[in-house]
Image: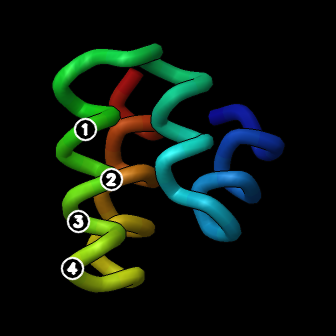
C-alpha cells in the first residue's frame, strides 16, 4: 500500500480514490459517500487503495 495515498484518503477521501483510479465510478461513489458521511468515504477510499 502506498502510505501517501492512505494519508490523503483519510484527509480527503475523494483525492485518494482519484489518484488510484481516476475519474471512474469509484471516484463518484466516494464523493457521494463522503457527502453522506465522512467516515463511509474514508472506509471506501482506504478499501479501494488497499484492494489495488
Q: Quick one: label 3, few (<14), some, or many (20+) residues within 10 Å?
A: many
* Residue occupied by mark 3: 33
Residue 40: which quarter of the image? bottom left
- Give how far apart the Cα atoms at labels 4 and 2 are: 9 Å
* Residue occupied by mark 2: 31
Residue 21: which quarter of the image? top left
- Give how far apart the Cα atoms at labels 2 and 3 are: 5 Å
Q: Is residue 41 above or below residue 18?
A: below
- Answer whether labels 3 and 4 touch (C-beta < 8 Å): yes
- Answer whether labels 1 and 2 touch (C-beta < 8 Å): yes
- Give how far apart the Cα atoms at labels 4 and 1 are: 12 Å
Secondary structure of the residue carrying tag 4 is: helix
* Residue occupied by mark 1: 28
Q: Residue at x 52, y 22 (%)?
A: 20
Q: Quadrant of the C terminus?
A: top left
Q: Is residue 19 above or below residue 33?
A: above
Q: Quick one: label 1, few (<14), some, or many (20+) residues within 10 Å?
A: some
Q: Is residue 41 above or below residue 48?
A: below
Residue 51: horizontal and vertical position, in percent?
34, 32
Amino acid at each position: 500500500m502506498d502510505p501517501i495515498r492512505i494519508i490523503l484518503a483519510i484527509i480527503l477521501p475523494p483525492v485518494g480514490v482519484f489518484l488510484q483510479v481516476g475519474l471512474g465510478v469509484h471516484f463518484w461513489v466516494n464523493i457521494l459517500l463522503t457527502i453522506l458521511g465522512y467516515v463511509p468515504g474514508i472506509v471506501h477510499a482506504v478499501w479501494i487503495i488497499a484492494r489495488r
